């Protein structure tokens, strides 16, 4: 309990430091909000000044920071300069889309990555193991945007198997049955989730392969074999279970990364999630949205770490003992 | 389904002048009248009735609009002259602070003579007074907006759930995804042929083009880059439409010192140097290389929409590096050992700002760097994100910048804003009383002929002063699915005739037939 309280306090301090740094950075960055999009002349100085005064941006940065923290404590995230909506409503719109994409990508990452690593662990040293090692290294080193564009070009633009963007087809989605809507949503999800999940799966496979190999050669596995336990049970009940322990930490870090780090994938596939929201906000200097996205990202990283630590303690009795 | 490179900020017309916002709200709200296919903005010739069935001049400065009695808001209420007067009061209100407010500065008042008659009174007579009266304002429903405090218009819920009087009515706006409009079957000017319009939001132009090429969307109004045009040309289900463009691209020189508006620029304040830089630039070759036939070099800062001002006798310095060398030598800029000119210890180095998001402008920057190097000018390309570049220009912290300006159908506002000494977009600090006087005459003249002659003088002065290098005026090329017929484009607003586009019954797809 004391450990949890200590971690929570440290989390709040971390959050405050992150918010302060980002607040300073975004306000000191060149460029101001209220600039027109596209090939339009920038607003004249008087118009910009009027808008800045309206949103309190003409005040010293310390005053603006104080007001921001005060509003945050009251649970107010402010109003977007560019979308002219409450930031909380924008986040509420974007989060479910990002959660869906992140969950699908994490599932691909986990199932595919673990599957490959188990296969490699069982066939360690074989030609197929070496081929998979090279393949996962190749995929892991691919830039996300490049992989996304290639998948989009091949499966969307050339073969027309899958839609090239968005989360549904707005022309037909509402006219479909419930099952039809689910299929429509899944079809739109496949390319961005595979783009995001495939690279993660390659990383997971490379991370897990040594753990599976080590587990398969551990003393307790030899003992189990000597006791006549079946090889399938040895693999799934003993080796894989133990090899999964380090993955818990990896997953704890990967999930918030998937939530906030999907900027490129969300942009390539016009996926209206948090990553795209944050990227657009930075480009337009939409301070309230940038700060809210930062807050959310920081919270997710902190909570992800905390959850990973808790899971680790639950899964490994030695850690539970050590933390008492 | 239209692929849109972005998402609107609001659909409340006075609050925005962004192109995408306008694309959508112009299907929801009507103007009193609209310019015709010829794009004329002088006098009232060629203007088409919209909300006003007809108009007449009560005096040289009093314009009377007679509203079409069939016009209705989508909630069933009649559109009245009171709505017109309310609209003018809203657009010119200082709290609402509409971007179109300045365009209405010559209109003294708008009054409702009776429920169907609105009277506009101007402070003077000038060529584009009818254009100003009808083009900038979309008439608003007073019965829904009058009670809304002006300070709340910016974020009003009406901006996301508007009630208009146009050919289409809003069905839904799903944040981050799409806007759907449905045809108003009782629209008094004729039921639109396309039953539904959906704007699908994408993060940028290249994603929008991908959606159209892949068949996930049916139309995109402008492809911009030659690469996009070639991709769309290769897609057999698309038809491409070319129409006059509204964008021109130029290098703007800062005539004041970089970061100090009180001092002359050590290199670019000299008109002879600027002329030399223009002479050293083979603009036709660059346009061919970069635009691949999808644009041309105008005689001034003019888009293709202003072809009426492309005067054939205005002489822009031709490509002539020998003459450029002579001019620079004559001004004391001597070539140094590394090939770069120097004068009095000042090296002829120019920082050229270019937005990192524009492939076309980056390509221009690279070619300019190469061509100007040949006459001893060192060009340092400063790539930066658009917001940073706009900030630098606004505060005078640049030597030269490659800009692309999107124009409206009237040259009046754009040319004046960008080049008058006090123009709000005159970032380079260009100042010539002869130009200001010519523009003043063009704006004040009651005669279209006199106005045109004054514009000629203004553009000739600009060409002679070379405050920038005019690079190109882009063609607009749209891509529309071939099953859509009767497609026409008006240069200032591609969707002006959208309600007349149609899909023949035998070409309807399952998506076209889908019911909500």
Image: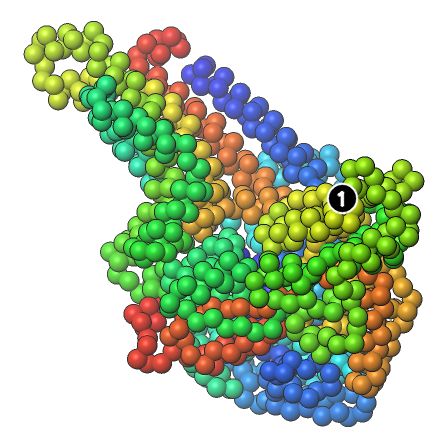
> Is B187 situated above or below B103?
below
Indicate left or right for B197 with B417 as reference. Answer: left
Residue B200 falls in image quadrant: bottom left
Q: Quadrant of the N terminus of chain A?
A: top left
Instruction: Give the total number of marks visible in the rendering.
Output: 1
Can you identify the residue that label 1 sits on?
A: B378
> x, y (%) of residue A140?
38, 31
Give the secondary structure at mark 1. strand
Depth check: give the residue in front, A58 or A105: A105
Depth check: give the residue in front, B434 or B345: B345
Q: What residue is rendered at 88% in x and 50% in y?
A: B329
Q: What residue is rendered at 45% in x and 46% in y?
A: A266
Residue B107 falls in image quadrant: bottom right
> x, y (%) of residue B2?
46, 66
> x, y (%) of residue B233?
44, 65
Chain at tag 1: B
Q: Is residue B398 visible?
A: no
Q: Is residue B469 visible?
A: yes
């Amino acid at each position: 309990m004391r450990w949890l309280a200590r971690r929570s306090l440290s989390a709040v301090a971390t959050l405050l430091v992150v918010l302060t740094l980002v607040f300073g950075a975004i306000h000191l960055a060149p460029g101001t909000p209220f600039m027109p999009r596209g090939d339009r002349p920038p607003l004249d100085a008087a118009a910009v000044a009027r808008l800045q005064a309206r949103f309190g941006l003409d005040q010293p940065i310390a005053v603006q920071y104080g007001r921001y923290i005060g509003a945050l404590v009251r649970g107010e995230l402010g109003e977007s300069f560019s979308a002219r909506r409450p930031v909380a409503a924008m986040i509420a719109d974007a989060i479910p889309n990002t959660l869906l994409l992140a969950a699908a990508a994490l599932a691909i990452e986990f199932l595919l990555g673990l599957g490959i690593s188990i296969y490699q662990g069982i066939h360690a040293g074989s030609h197929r193991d070496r081929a998979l090692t090279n393949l996962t290294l190749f995929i892991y080193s691919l830039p996300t945007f490049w992989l996304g564009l290639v998948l989009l070009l091949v499966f969307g633009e050339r073969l027309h198997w899958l839609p090239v963007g968005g989360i549904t087809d707005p022309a037909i989605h509402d006219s479909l049955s419930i099952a039809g809507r689910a299929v429509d949503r899944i079809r739109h999800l496949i390319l961005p989730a595979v783009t995001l999940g495939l690279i993660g799966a390659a990383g997971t496979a490379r991370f897990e392969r040594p753990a599976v190999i080590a587990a398969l050669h551990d003393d307790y596995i030899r003992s189990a074999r000597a006791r006549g336990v079946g090889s399938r049970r040895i693999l799934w009940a003993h080796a894989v279970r133990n090899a999964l322990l380090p993955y818990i930490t990896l997953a704890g870090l990967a999930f918030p990364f998937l939530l906030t780090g999907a900027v490129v994938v969300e942009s390539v596939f016009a996926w209206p999630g948090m990553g795209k929201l944050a990227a657009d906000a930075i480009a337009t200097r939409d301070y309230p949205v940038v700060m809210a996205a930062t807050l959310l990202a920081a919270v997710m990283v902190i909570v992800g770490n905390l959850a990973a630590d808790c899971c680790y303690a639950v899964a490994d009795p030695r850690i539970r003992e050590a933390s008492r | 389904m239209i692929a849109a490179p972005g998402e609107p900020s609001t659909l409340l017309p006075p609050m925005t002048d962004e192109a995408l916002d306008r694309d959508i709200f112009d299907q929801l709200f009507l103007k009193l009248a609209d310019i015709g296919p010829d794009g004329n903005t002088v006098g009232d010739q060629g203007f088409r009735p919209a909300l006003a069935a007809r108009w007449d001049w009560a005096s040289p400065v009093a314009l009377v609009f007679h509203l079409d009695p069939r016009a209705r808001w989508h909630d069933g209420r009649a559109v009245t002259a009171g709505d017109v007067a309310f609209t003018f009061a809203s657009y010119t209100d200082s709290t609402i602070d509409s971007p179109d407010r300045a365009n209405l500065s010559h209109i003294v008042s708008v009054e409702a003579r009776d429920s169907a008659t609105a009277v506009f009174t101007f402070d003077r007579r000038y060529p584009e007074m009818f254009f100003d009266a009808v083009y900038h304002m979309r008439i608003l429903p007073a019965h829904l907006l009058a009670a809304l405090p002006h300070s709340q218009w910016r974020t009003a819920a009406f901006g996301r759930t508007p009630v208009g009087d146009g050919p289409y009515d809003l069905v839904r706006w799903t944040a981050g995804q799409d806007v759907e409009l449905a045809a108003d079957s009782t629209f008094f000017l004729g039921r639109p042929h396309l039953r539904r319009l959906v704007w699908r939001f994408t993060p940028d132009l290249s994603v929008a083009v991908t959606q159209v090429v892949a068949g996930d969307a049916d139309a995109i109004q402008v492809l911009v880059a030659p690469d996009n045009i070639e991709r769309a040309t290769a897609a057999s289900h698309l038809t491409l439409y070319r129409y006059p463009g509204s964008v021109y691209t130029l290098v703007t020189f800062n005539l004041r010192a970089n970061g100090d508006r009180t001092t002359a620029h050590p290199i670019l304040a000299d008109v002879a140097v600027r002329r030399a830089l223009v002479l050293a630039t083979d603009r036709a070759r660059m346009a061919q290389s970069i635009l691949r036939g999808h644009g041309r070099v105008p005689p001034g800062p003019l888009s293709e929409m202003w072809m009426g001002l492309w005067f054939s006798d205005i002489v822009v310095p031709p490509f002539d590096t020998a003459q450029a060398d002579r001019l620079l030598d004559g001004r004391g800029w001597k070539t140094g050992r590394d090939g770069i000119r120097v004068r009095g210890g000042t090296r002829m180095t120019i920082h050229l700002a270019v937005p990192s998001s524009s492939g076309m402008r980056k390509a221009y920057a690279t070619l300019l760097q190469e061509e100007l190097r040949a006459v001893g000018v060192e060009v340092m390309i400063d790539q930066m994100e658009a917001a940073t570049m706009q900030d630098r220009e606004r505060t005078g912290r640049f030597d030269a910048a490659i800009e692309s300006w999107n124009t409206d159908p009237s040259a009046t506002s754009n040319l004046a804003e960008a080049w008058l000494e006090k123009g709000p977009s005159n970032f380079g600090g260009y100042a010539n009383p002869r130009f200001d006087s010519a523009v003043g005459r063009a704006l004040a003249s009651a005669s279209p002929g006199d106005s045109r002659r004054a514009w000629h003088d203004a553009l000739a002065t600009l060409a002679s002063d070379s405050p920038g290098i005019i690079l190109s005026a882009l063609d607009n090329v749209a891509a529309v699915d071939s099953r859509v017929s009767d497609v026409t484009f008006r240069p200032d607003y591609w969707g002006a005739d959208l309600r007349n586009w149609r899909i023949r019954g035998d070409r309807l797809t399952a998506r076209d037939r889908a019911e909500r």
